[in-house]
Image (cartoon, rainbow, N blue to C red):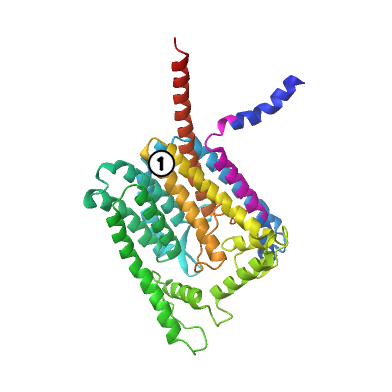
Amino acid sequence: MAEFATIEKSPLRNISARTKGDKVIWSAVILLSLVSLLAVYSSTGLLAYKMNKGNNEIYLFKQFAFIVIGVLIIYFAHQVNYTIYSKVALILFLISIPLLIYTLFFGVKLNEGSRWIRLPIINLTFQTSDLAKLALFMYLGRLLSKKQQVIKDFKKGFLPIIIPVAIVCLLIAPANLSTALLIGATSMMLMFIGRVSAKHLLLTIGVAIVPVMILILAAIIRHHSNEGITGKPKTESHSRLFVRVGTWVNRVETFIYGSKENNNDDNYQVNQAKIAIANGSWIGLGPGNSRQRNFLPHPYSDFIYAIIIEEYGLIGGAFIICIYLTLLFRSIRIYKRCPFAFGAFLALGLSFTLMIQALANMAVNVNLFPVTGVTLPLVSMGGSSFLFTCLAIGILLSVARNVEQLEGNELEKELEAEGAP
C-alpha cells in the first residue's frame, strides 16, 4: 500500500517540482482562471441563444480549452531562461511592425476598426497589437538595460528608446486609441524607473497630450454646436486610417456630458453597466443570477467586470482588484530581487501593462473612463489577447524562476562556506 501511494503521488510531485517561479503569481493565475470560467459561463447566455440555440455550455468548454492552452503556454514560457527573450526581442519587434502596417490597411474590420488579421490556414483572427505590445516591452527592457551608461543623453540614450515606442503607438492608435494610450503610459512609467531623464519624459508627455487635448476640445465644441439638434450627428470619416476619429469624439462627449439619445451605443453600455453594479450591491445576486447579461453588450469581454459585481457584489469586485494588486506587488518584489537589469525591467514592464489594462477595463465598467475595447486580463472570454497575456505571465515567471535559482545557489555556497573546516 505504501508503494502504491508513492506511485500515485509521484506525478503530482513531479509537476510541482517542475513548476518554478513565484507561487503567489501562480495562485493569482489559477484564481483569475476560475473566476473567468464562472463569469464567462454566466455572461454568454444571450450569445449562446443567438448563435447556438441556447447551448451556452459550448462557451464554457471553449473557455476551459483556452485556459488549458494558456496554462501550457505559461508553463513552457517559464521554463525558458529569460535571457533568451532578450535575444529574440529585436526579432519580434521587427516582425510586429509590418504586421501592424498590414493590419492598418488590410486587416479584418470589426466595430469600425481594423485591429485583426485572419490566419489563412486555421481561419482564426488575432489582434496584432497584442504581439506588438509584448514585443515592445521585451525590446524596451533590453534597451534600458544596455543604455544605462548613457541613459541621460538625449541622442544616445533617449531617442533610441522613445522611437520604438512612438512607432508602435502611432501604428496602433488609428484603430485602437485606448490601447496605444495604455502602451504609451506603461512605457513612460518603465522609462521613469529606468532612470530616463525627467526632462525628456516631460517633453514627451507634453507632445503626446496635445492630440488628447484636441480630442477633448473637439468633443466640447461639437456638444455645444449640436445642442438642440435632434438625431445623431454624422461625423464619422470614411478614410480607413481615420475611421475612428468620430468614434473617439463621440465617446469623449458621452463621457463628459452623457447623451440624450437612448440609441447612443456608448451611453447604452454605460447605463446597463451601472444597472448591473446597482443590482449587485454588497454581496451580489449570486453566481449565474445576473439580469443585465441579457441587455449589456459584450458582457463576456469588455463589460465582464460589471457582471462580476452584479453576481458577487462589491466584495467580489474588490477581491478581483486585490488579486491584480497582489500580482503587481509580487512583480515589484521580483524586480527588486533580480540582479540583472534586463530581467528587472522585463518583470516591471509586463506586470505594469497587465495592471494598467485591468484598471482601465474596470474604470470603464464603473464609468470612470470613456468606453474602450480593452478586455480584463485572464478573465474576459478567451482570444488572442488571453493567450498573449498568458505568454507575458510565463515570461514574468521565467524571471522569478531564475531569481530563485540564483538565490538558491548563493544559499548553498553560504552553507558550504559555513560547514567548511
Q: State the residue at coordinates (49%, 57%).
A: 357
Q: Residue furthest right?
A: 1
Question: Is residue 164 at least partly visible in the picture?
Answer: yes
Check the image and report above or below for 78 versus 351: above
Which residue in the structure is indicated by mark 1?
Answer: 344
Residue 360 rendering spot, x and y as whole percentages: 50, 60
The reply, left or right, for residue 23 in relation to residue 404 is right
Instruction: Name the residue located 41 percent from the left edge and 54 percent from the top edge.
Output: 186
Residue closer to the observer: 318 or 154: 318
Magenta stretch prevailing secondary structure = helix
Residue reaching furthest top? 421
* SS state under label 1: helix
Name the one closer to the observer, 204 or 19: 204
Magenta extent: 17-38
330 part of magenta stretch: no
Give the x, y percent position of residue 224: 44, 85
Amino acid identity at mark 1: Ala
Percent position (x, y) of residue 352?
A: 45, 51
Residue 126 seen in the figure = no
Left or right: residue 18 compared with residue 133: right
Image coordinates of residue 135 in percent, x first then y, are: 40, 49
Residue at horizontal 49 percent and vertical 52 percent from the top: 354
Which image quarter is the N terminus in? Answer: top right
Q: Is residue 187 above or below residue 372?
A: above
